[in-house]
Image: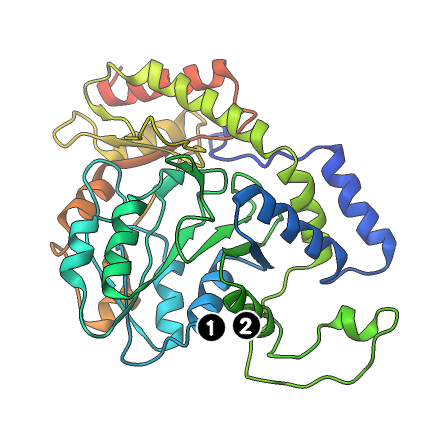
């Protein structure tokens, strides 16, 4: 087996991160408490959203939001087939139905024109996904939503730090779900957050996050607390721990530097590959800020080497890669729903057929980017 010299992703941790977690471990209070509250306040300031609920994943954030909006059987949520399964899983878990529409050729983000065509009397929510952190056309999506009386929940798993037309992601739709999973632009290990300007939504999500309880553990067992509580509705177990939140706070303090470093890497890739005829580079708008969570390229149809050849060639040279994403309707669970078949979403399918995600992390050096690009050219042209 070839040693992986340049991994696909590498978590950026420093001594401040470790010290932040150690302080919580030494405090004796490990689960949801002051660190979570502080992280929520700092994320609110960063995103411009008045209310933030820190939870244990972006999946939980999306599910809690849809549950708080009382989504259920007979309701429909419009989203994209070109995403990770969590985006649609949360719709199914509420009992509602995902309605998939194709993406744009330019950036693989959901096509607003197709959203409008898919709206029915049962449509309740639009769930766009900001692929790799490049924002969807949120002005068009919000215009559609307002005209039809729909809610908009952004899958912003890739988009912490994204700025759309001068506005930070988290303050664009009715709510936005961020991911802080281990490979994200900032991490809590496992974790996520829901950002919103709707106080009522945030209040209900907070209750649903911890079993529908009237009080969390900190309020019951902390100084001045009481053992009495009430189960006000049937909730879930989606809270974030103080251990994770302490790491998140330390990471958030360096997020702007992370994005600056990722932008350097992306610019180096673009400079290296802009003249490569067999490669399509990622499309992005100059008026927005792209945090470059991942760097997606496409091998052109008709190139000498296929997408799978490229992945194999880079693997042989010790370079890690991934593919974003396998379209939802290709998966067994979605096939069993009997609603879609191959050919239904031609743009998403073309993207998938050629897509390769190259290594991307702040510590990637210019020399390593150059090595990846040289290996890519050799693989493409059989040299």
Q: Quadrant of residue 120?
A: bottom left
Query: Foreground: 369 or 165?
Result: 165
From the top left corner, tell me how far across and down residue 98 is, in percent: 28, 67
Query: Foreground: 214 or 305?
Result: 214
Q: Gap between marks 2 and 1, in whole Å? A: 6 Å
Query: Foreground: 139 or 26?
Result: 139
Q: Residue at x 76, y 57 (%)?
A: 34
Q: Which mark is residue 381?
A: none
Query: Foreground: 209 or 9?
Result: 209
108 relative position to 343: left or right: right
Q: Residue at x 73, y 53 (%)?
A: 35
From the top left corner, tell me how far across and down residue 18 is, in percent: 75, 40
* Circle 1: element type: helix
In the rendered view of the protein, which quadrant contains the C terminus?
top left
In this orientation, does residue 54 appear?
Answer: yes
Whether the residues at callouts 2 and 1 have beta carbons within 8 Å, the answer is yes
Rendered position, 76 above or below 136: below
In this orientation, does residue 341 appear?
Answer: no
Q: Which residue is mark 2?
A: 204
298 relative position to 166: left or right: left
Q: Which residue is mark 1?
A: 68
User: Which sits earlier in the primary sequence, circle 2 or circle 1?
Assistant: 1
From the top left corner, tell me how far across and down residue 135 is, in percent: 35, 41
């Amino acid at each position: 087996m070839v040693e992986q010299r340049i991994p696909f992703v590498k978590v950026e941790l420093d001594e401040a991160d470790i010290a932040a977690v150690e302080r919580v471990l030494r405090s004796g209070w490990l689960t949801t408490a002051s660190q979570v509250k502080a992280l929520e306040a700092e994320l609110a300031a960063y995103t411009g959203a008045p209310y933030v609920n820190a939870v244990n994943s972006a999946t939980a954030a999306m599910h809690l939001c849809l549950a708080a909006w009382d989504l259920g059987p007979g309701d429909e949520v419009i989203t994209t087939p070109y995403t990770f399964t969590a985006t649609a899983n949360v719709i199914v878990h509420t009992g509602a139905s995902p309605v998939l529409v194709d993406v744009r050729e330019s950036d693989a983000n959901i096509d607003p024109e197709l959203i409008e065509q898919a709206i029915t009397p049962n449509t309740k929510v639009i769930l766009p996904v900001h692929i790799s952190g490049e924002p969807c056309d949120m002005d068009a999506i919000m215009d559609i939503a307002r005209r039809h009386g729909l809610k908009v929940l952004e899958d912003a798993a890739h988009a912490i730090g994204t700025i759309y037309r001068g506005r930070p992601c988290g303050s664009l739709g009715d709510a936005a779900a961020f991911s802080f999973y281990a490979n994200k632009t900032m991490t809590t290990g496992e974790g996520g957050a829901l950002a919103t300007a709707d106080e009522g939504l945030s209040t209900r999500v907070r209750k649903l996050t911890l079993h529908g309880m009237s009080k969390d553990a900190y309020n019951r067992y902390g100084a001045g607390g009481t053992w009495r509580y009430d189960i006000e509705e049937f909730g879930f177990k989606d809270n974030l721990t103080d251990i994770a939140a302490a790491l998140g706070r330390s990471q958030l303090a360096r997020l702007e530097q992370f994005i600056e470093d990722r932008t350097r890497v992306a610019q180096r890739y673009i400079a290296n590959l802009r003249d490569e005829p067999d490669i399509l580079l990622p499309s992005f708008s100059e008026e927005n800020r792209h945090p470059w969570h991942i760097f997606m390229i496409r091998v052109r149809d008709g190139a000498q080497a296929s997408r799978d050849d490229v992945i194999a060639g880079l693997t042989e040279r010790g370079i890690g890669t991934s593919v974003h994403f396998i379209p939802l309707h290709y998966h067994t669970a979605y096939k069993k729903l009997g609603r879609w078949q191959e050919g239904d979403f031609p743009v998403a399918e073309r993207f998938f057929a050629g897509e390769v995600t190259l290594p991307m992390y702040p510590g990637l050096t210019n020399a390593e980017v150059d090595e990846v690009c040289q290996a890519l050219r050799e693989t493409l042209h059989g040299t």
